[in-house]
Image (cartoon, rainbow, N blue to C red):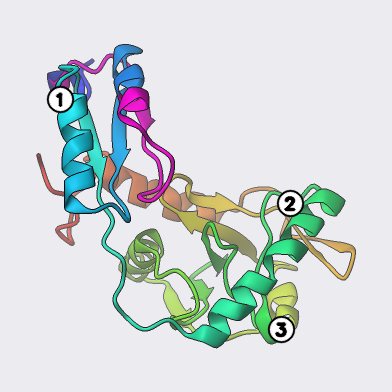
Amino acid sequence: MSSPLSPLGVELPVLAAPMAGGPSTPALVAAAARAGGLGFLAAGYKTVDQLAGQIAEVRAQAVPFGVNLFVPNPVPVDRAAFARYAAALQPIMDARAKYQADQVLFCPEGQVQETGAANFLLLREGELMTRSLDSSFLHGVTRDSLLTMGRDMGYTVTEKKFDVLEMLDWVRTGEAALAGTAAVLAGVGTLIYGGIEHRVGTGHVGNVTKALRAKLVAVQRGESPDAHGWLERV
């Protein structure tokens, strides 16, 4: 069975794709290609000349590669929100060390927000809820896609501010999940608050989470119609 990468001569479905401003070098990209995968240059925060030089260096290796292009948002930064985010970094490291948590959910002033790596959603039969957008956290493409798919499935989608206690009340019988590019939608089994573990629903990935994830993945793979024009053939 061929894959979309087969015409490029890529043998393995492995993408060495850093965040747009993350670590990547022409040598690393070439090594990924020679191993059978597809390497990407990180183009974030580079000048045109710097990026052109790296592209030329990889092209000289005669291997397939991509460029992870990132254009920073010109919207002014909310300095207060940035300060809160920076101040949270050490507590995040402390919490991970103490509780062996996979993710730390930001809740500035008691208001549920995101984990930094993913958007946070609450789900139950016929209903989705997530924090309303503002300038203090990621406006995730996957988040937007999932909310759109939820509306298509007839769910009531609510975007609003909600606090930790409301979240804990929801997960007694409902579901919680993290939305992001890699995981698409990953179920949350346990929340830790005030040193106490709170089981989310049954403690396993819920049926609503599974159904919503499956519906979006089917569109991504071309197995279901793309009703919103999200896919672009290249």
Q: Is residue 4 visible?
A: no
Badge 1: residue crowd in 10 Å (few <14, some 14–19, many ≥20)? some
Depth-wise, is mark 1 or mark 2 nearer the camera?
1
| Residue appearing at x 35%, y 32% in the figure | 25
Q: Is residue 35 visible?
A: yes
In the rendered view, would you say 6 is above or below 76?
above
Q: Are marks 2 and 3 in contact (CB under 8 Å)?
A: no
Q: Amino acid at mark 1?
A: Arg
Residue 203 disc label: 2
Which quarter of the picture shows residue 52?
Answer: top left
The earlier-in-sequence mark between 3 and 1 is 1
Q: Pinpoint residue 148: horizontal percent, then vertical percent.
A: 32, 68
Q: Pinpoint residue 110: horizontal percent, then vertical percent.
A: 71, 83
* Residue 22 as seen in the image, left or right of residue 3: right
Depth-wise, is mark 2 or mark 3 nearer the camera?
3
Q: Amino acid at mark 2?
A: Gly
Q: Amino acid at mark 3?
A: Gly
Point out the image quarter for the N terminus.
top left
Nearest to the observer: residue 155 or residue 144: 144
Q: Pinpoint residue 156: horizontal percent, then vertical percent.
A: 43, 78
In terms of secondary structure, where does tag 3 sit? Answer: helix
Name the residue that disc number 1 marks: 59
Residue 110 disc label: 3
Q: Residue furthest right?
A: 195
Spatial CA distance of label 1 from label 2 is 49 Å
| Residue appearing at x 43%, y 77% in the figure | 157
Q: Pinpoint residue 65: horizontal percent, then vertical percent.
A: 22, 29
Which quarter of the picture shows residue 84?
Answer: bottom right
Badge 2: residue crowd in 10 Å (few <14, some 14–19, many ≥20)? some
* Residue 2 as seen in the image, left or right of residue 234: right
